[in-house]
Image (spheres, rainbow, N blue to C red):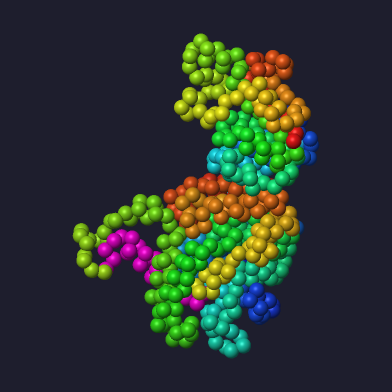
């Protein structure tokens, strides 16, 4: 098994498909970049799928190839952690539409020999999940011990339970929602307009001369980044402190530390992310409404299958507030599904799910192992 | 593990394999006992995040929520039993909570500390102070118990609302007390109710 080239870090596969997308298009081939950790048990019962967030990637517990930073969820995945490769066979794949090796606007369209750019079909969260389903088929994984995700990853986890109810035994949904609100869509629209207003965007056709709409993408990231934090967190970290100066400059440099911080967030983001991917994935998020896919009643999404659910929210998360998790809990109760839910306290807003959260780890560990 | 006496009574009288909603389930002690001893499919609702974390940590399905506000989302007759142990007196609207209990469960267990127990009476009568006892250990200003009631209060309440009592158990100083003497001698009461 260890010599099977399907398993390990930095894997990539082109599956023939075709994958019929929610928008009606057929995608073929379906390229998926992914990583696996640990060993698939002979009975296949230990597979755990980790789903990443908007700007995440497949490097859940291995260093990022461009930034060299540690995996984005080593607090949850790793030796002695709730998801432990010594016990679990962990899979994490780059979502459809992203830019870390899976099919998306930055990848070459085999039909034209050029990047898809805006010729890539608009995708949905369910399309991402169906592509992951194809990957699992390729890996020989029939059912998942658990599907786990935060933020957009949580939406994929919910969509997994609704789309493949008989392939999921447990579903962990952290800091997430069953549908994008008007406010969520509004913030994303600011980001998209910022990218498209950058003259370098050129209708998305910017790959050939290596001159992407970095300014537009950076502003998009800055606006979005504010939604990942909390007012209290920003006040505690920056307040009105000035950046490397004793007095206001009466100009438009980054006088305040918070300005400097956001500019840094924007600039470092453009080195690792593709502007068109940002357009496509935010669109997929905005289209997400799990109830709408099930006759307008969220409970209907969860009637089939035997999955157990665990939801976690954070009290300072105003992007996907606790109320959104409560809606999901109510729907799960109405559908008679076993569900656990806890709102944890954190000063860090939406980003809390990626940070040190011992209570979250305790809940997830108990949920995953206690119900096995 | 040894259960609190009122929980032990409830655990002994839940039918094996039943579906149970434990409202105010704390760290899940009763749920775990019901699951392990009687094969019960138990779900919980609990206010404290730390208690929810502890209960989920032992593999139980517990939702963080408030009996006063979060019961409306549970469908009618979705459980064989709804359990409310030592929680009724902490709710803002005990009558509304009880209506939900009997709507969600086909039967309901309700346990509460009896405010007419003789120690409580003596404390108020002779001491002239709000009683602080083993079962009611908090001072008046920080007690979660905002709707004190007695065994007779509860009986009258059930009679007015036409709720049938299927069983009642009374405990005082660690032993069973008769129904007739309960209002004076019982520290806790456990009622099994049916719509």
Q: Nearer the viewer, residue A187 or A366?
A: A187
Query: Image height check: is A303 above or below B47?
Result: below
**Quarter of the figure with residue A173:** bottom right
Query: Image height check: is A24 above or below A338?
Result: below
- Spot occupied by residue A178 in the image (x, y as percentages of width and height): 60, 60
Query: Image height check: is B72 above or below B157?
Result: below
Q: Overall secondary structure of the magenta stretch?
A: helix
Q: In what quadrant of the picture does the N terminus of chain A appear?
A: bottom right
- Spot occupied by residue A226 in the image (x, y as percentages of width and height): 41, 61
* Residue occupying image coordinates x 44% and y 65%: A224
Q: Nearer the viewer, residue A305 or A177?
A: A177
Kindly tell me whether residue A10 is visible in this rendering.
Answer: no
**Quarter of the figure with residue A110:** bottom right
* Residue occupying image coordinates x 52% and y 15%: B124
Query: Image height check: is B181 above or below A297?
Result: above
User: Where does the magenta region start and end?
Assistant: A253-277
Is residue A160 found inside the magenta-colored segment of the image? no
- Spot occupied by residue A149 in the image (x, y as percentages of width and height): 58, 59
Q: Residue furthest front?
A: B160
* Residue occupying image coordinates x 55% and y 12%: B122
* Residue occupying image coordinates x 46% and y 51%: A316
Q: Residue furthest right?
A: B16
**Quarter of the figure with residue A102:** bottom right
Q: Residue furthest bottom?
A: A112
Is residue A150 rendered to the left or right of residue B102?
left
Kindly tell me whether residue B70 is visible in this rendering.
Answer: yes
- Spot occupied by residue A265 in the image (x, y as percentages of width and height): 39, 66
């Amino acid at each position: 098994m260890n010599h099977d080239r399907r398993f390990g870090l930095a894997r990539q596969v082109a599956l023939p498909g075709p994958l019929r997308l929610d928008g009606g298009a057929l995608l073929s081939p379906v390229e998926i970049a992914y990583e696996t950790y640990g060993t698939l048990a002979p009975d296949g019962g230990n597979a755990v799928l980790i789903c990443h967030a908007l700007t995440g990637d497949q490097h859940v517990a291995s260093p990022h190839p461009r930034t060299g930073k540690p995996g984005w969820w080593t607090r949850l995945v790793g030796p002695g952690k709730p998801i432990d490769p010594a016990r679990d066979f962990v899979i994490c794949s780059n979502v459809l539409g992203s830019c870390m090796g899976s099919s998306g606007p930055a990848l070459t369209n085999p039909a034209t020999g050029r990047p898809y750019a805006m010729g890539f079909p608009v995708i949905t969260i369910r399309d991402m999940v169906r592509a992951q389903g194809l990957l699992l088929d390729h890996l020989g994984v029939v059912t998942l011990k658990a599907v786990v995700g935060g933020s957009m990853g949580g939406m994929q986890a919910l969509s997994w339970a609704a789309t493949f109810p008989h392939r999921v035994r447990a579903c962990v949904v952290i800091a997430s929602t069953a549908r994008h609100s008007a406010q969520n869509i509004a913030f994303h629209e600011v980001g998209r307009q910022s990218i498209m207003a950058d003259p370098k965007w050129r209708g998305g056709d910017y790959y050939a001369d290596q001159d992407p709409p970095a300014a537009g993408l950076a502003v998009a990231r800055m606006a979005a980044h504010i939604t990942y934090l909390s007012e209290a967190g920003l006040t505690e970290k920056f307040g009105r402190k000035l950046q490397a100066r004793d007095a206001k400059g009466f100009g438009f440099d980054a006088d305040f530390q918070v300005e400097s911080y956001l500019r840094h967030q924007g600039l470092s983001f453009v080195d690792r992310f593709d502007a068109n991917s940002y357009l496509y994935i935010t669109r997929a998020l905005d289209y997400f409404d799990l109830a709408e896919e099930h006759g307008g009643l969220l409970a209907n999404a969860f009637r089939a299958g035997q999955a157990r659910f665990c939801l976690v929210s954070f009290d300072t998360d105003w992007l996907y507030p606790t109320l959104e998790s409560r809606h999901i809990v109510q729907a799960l109760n109405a559908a008679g599904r076993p569900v656990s839910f806890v709102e944890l306290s954190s000063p860090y807003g939406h980003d809390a799910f990626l940070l040190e959260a011992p209570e979250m780890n305790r809940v997830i560990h108990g949920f995953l192992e206690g119900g096995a | 593990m040894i259960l609190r006496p009122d929980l032990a009574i409830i655990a002994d009288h839940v039918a094996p394999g039943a579906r149970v909603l434990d409202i105010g389930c704390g760290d899940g002690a009763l749920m775990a006992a019901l699951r392990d001893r009687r094969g019960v499919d138990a779900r919980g609702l609990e206010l404290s995040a730390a208690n929810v974390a502890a209960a989920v940590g032992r593999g139980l399905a517990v939702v963080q929520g408030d009996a006063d506000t979060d019961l409306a989302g549970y469908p009618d007759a979705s459980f064989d039993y709804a359990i409310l142990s030592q929680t009724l007196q902490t709710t803002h609207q005990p009558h509304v909570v009880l209506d939900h209990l009997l709507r969600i469960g086909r039967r309901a267990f309700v346990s509460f500390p009896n405010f007419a127990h003789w120690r409580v009476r003596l404390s108020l009568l002779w001491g002239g102070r709000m009683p602080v006892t083993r079962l009611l250990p908090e001072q008046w200003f920080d007690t979660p118990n905002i709707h004190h009631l007695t065994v007779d209060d509860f009986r009258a309440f059930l009679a007015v609302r036409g709720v049938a009592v299927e069983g009642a158990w009374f405990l005082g100083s660690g032993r069973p007390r008769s129904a007739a003497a309960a209002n004076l001698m019982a520290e806790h009461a456990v009622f099994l109710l049916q719509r």
